[in-house]
Amino acid sequence: EGPPGELDIDDVLDKLLQVRKRHPQSQIVTLKEETVTNLCQAALNVFSSQPMLLELDAPLNLCGDIHGQYHDLLRIFDNGGYPPQSNYLFLGDYVDRGKRSLETVCLLFA
């Protein structure tokens, strides 16, 4: 997962996506704590640099709450296309009920 303090986003995406053809109960992704921390920091930097009101380009896939359902998120991307080829607007509730909340938020941040 790269040198300490460095985030290899392609490596993170590879690890997160290599489980997509597995049964939902087997879609377990192991990332180092430092990788998750660096990913969260990178996402925070992006969010902080953006205006409060975003102007989004069509076409746009509008997605409701995913509640940490990693399998559902992977199916959404499999069916609608993966970013940046397809644009998405997620309305919230990314984590909480699903067993794969960490994987879900990591894929959205990556």
Image (cartoon, helix red, strand yellow):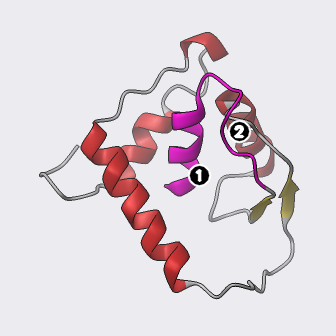
Location of residue 77 (image quadrant):
top right
Q: Callout 1: few (<14), some (14-19), or many (20+) C-alpha neighbours within 10 Å?
A: some
Q: In the rendered image, is residue 23 in sight?
A: no
- Give residue 23's position: percent from left, percent from top: 64, 13
In this rendering, position of residue 45 left or right of residue 103: left
* Front residue of 68 and 82: 68
- Give residue 42's position: percent from left, percent from top: 39, 65
How many numbered circles does the render carry? 2
Q: Which of the two labelled residues, at mark 2 and mark 1, occupies the earlier sequence position?
A: 2
Residue in the picture at 12% in, 52% down:
3
Residue in the picture at 73% in, 52% down:
81
* Vertical comparison of 110 with 46: above or below: above
Q: In the rendered image, is residue 41 in sight?
A: yes
The amino acid at mark 2 is Leu
Q: How far apart in space, not on screen, are marks 2 and 1 (Cα)?
A: 9 Å
Identify the element where label 1 is drawn: helix
- Give residue 45's position: percent from left, percent from top: 43, 74
* Vertical comparison of 24 with 88: above or below: above
Question: Which range of residues does the magenta coloring cover?
Answer: 92-110
Location of residue 66 (image quadrant):
top right
Do the residues under discs 2 and 1 have CB atoms within 8 angstroms? Answer: yes
In this rendering, position of residue 77 left or right of residue 16: right
Q: Callout 2: few (<14), some (14-19), or many (20+) C-alpha neighbours within 10 Å?
A: many
In this rendering, position of residue 87 left or right of residue 109: right
Q: Is residue 99 in the magenta section? A: yes
- Give residue 28's position: percent from left, percent from top: 49, 20
Residue in the picture at 68% in, 26% down:
98
Q: Quadrant of the N terminus?
A: top left
> Label 1 belongs to which residue?
108
> Label 2 belongs to which residue?
73
